[in-house]
Amino acid sequence: MIILGIETSCDETALALIETREISGHEGKRLEYRIIQSLVHSQAELHSAYGGVFPTLAKREHSKNLVPLLDKILKDLPVSNKKHDSFSETLESIKKQYAEQNGDLIESLTHAHFLENIPQIDKIAVTEGPGLEPALWVGITFARILGELWNIPVIPVNHMEGHVVGSLLTNDKPYGAWQQLKELPLPAVALLISGGHTELIKIEENFKYSLLGQTRDDAVGEAFDKVARLLGLPYPGGPYISKLAHEAWEQKIISPIKLPRPMINSKDLNFSFSGLKTAVLYAVQEAQKNNTFDENFKKGLAHEFEQSVTEVLEFKLSQAIEDIGAQAVIIGGGVSANHVLRERFTKIGEKYDIPVLLPSPQVSGDNALMIALVVAMNNENQNNLLITAKEIRANGTKKITE
Ligand code: KG4
Ligand code: ZN
């Protein structure tokens, strides 16, 4: 089965083609996959000027980028000899239907003659949420158009489930080679840490999800980004904070400020990072007043902030493992690119003697491979799905447990 994944929930326009097959062995069926291609076009630099993602700009950029990306990615698929019989008429009717909703996207279809060749794709997977609704709608509209034009089913996917299953991709072989997914013994704890989410989830048989805890205010990634801004660093700030923190460690710089470890003693599995950000704000204001807001101060504070986040996440993750008797941990979301966190999560696995599955660097951020994989893994359930492409709606606050 060949699946086209489409992801436009935030500031990355991403498309991927993945082929999957089921292999029967003595332990039952196993899913194998090969990546045909995965493309991610980041808008981060454009949004950087605004200090965060600017939804209207994201919508416009996704609308401009999807068609050229699709043209590029389809070149990696064997050409099918199927041509659309009434291509021009269908395209015209589609343009009329969606022109009002998204003029930029419709405009970009004008010279897209390559769409006339029907590719060998069995399903289209598209992110329906959570994320920025104007951005999500672009991907959904695009998926609907392709589904209608090529007569292919469109399946909605939860972005956060994408981050969970994305960590099952081994990605240790080149594109085109068949690979196996990592094994995930269940029950497992998933820790999702991204720009919009901080959640601990229990995963049971058949990938049934239930919420164990979540942030009450800011997400971890959001806290990294806000603290980065306070320190005068560009958006998205996570990697910059991480770099400064590493320099502090190398140069043995100790922060004169001790930051709180929010909710570490709360006895539940919830988080709160907004107070931590405020503590950083006060520390910065105080240093500015005293003329001590220099490079070393920033490095020390970045390190102390990263330590605080790490200790809180470590503590709550360990508690979740013990609470549910987890057989494994799976980490997902953009913040999982952080090296200190990756090291500490791995140590937790060693302590409890359970595997800790981390996303490979190419899928730690937003991508469409993980979106396509969700559809591949749920194949059997979807065949009975009654939802049609037209019923798919952007849902900015979609929960993984719904
Ligand atoms: O999952 P993601 O790519 O997008 C969302 O769905 O939000 O996550 C983006 C977040 C941003 O807040 C970014 O600053 C953070 O992940 N991030 C990091 C690192 N790399 C990205 N945070 C800490 N350390 C990093 N190395
Ligand atoms: Zn994400």
Image: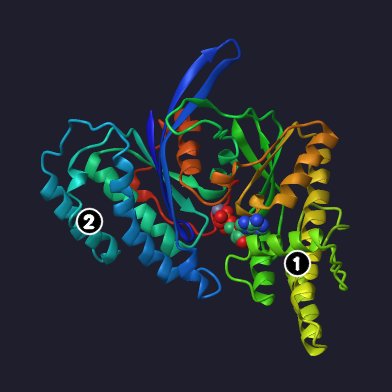
Left or right of residue 187: residue 172: left
Instruction: Point out residue 372 in the picture as x, y percentages from the top left corner.
Output: 45, 39
Check disc 2 and report the residue beneath it.
109
Residue 302: mark: 1
Question: Relative to 121, is 228 above or below?
Answer: below
Instruction: Point out residue 399 in the picture as x, y percentages from the top left corner.
Output: 58, 51
Instruction: Point out residue 252 in the picture as x, y percentages from the top left corner.
Output: 85, 62
**In terms of image quadrants, where is residue 239?**
bottom right
Q: Dot 1 surroundings within 10 Å: few (below 14), some, or many (20 or more)?
A: many
Residue 195 visible in the snapshot: no
Residue 182 visible in the snapshot: yes
Given residues 399 and 240, the one toward you in this image is 240
Question: Relative to 86, is 22 above or below?
Answer: above
The secondary structure type at the circle numbered 2 is loop
Residue at screen point 82% across, 44% down: 318
Given residues 300 and 328, the one toward you in this image is 300
Left or right of residue 241: residue 77: left
Q: Dot 2 surroundings within 10 Å: few (below 14), some, or many (20 or more)?
A: some
Residue farthest to the top?
26
Q: Ligand 1 closer than 8 Å to the CB at disc 1?
A: no
Q: Indicate the colouring scheme.
A: rainbow
Given residues 202 and 20, the one toward you in this image is 20
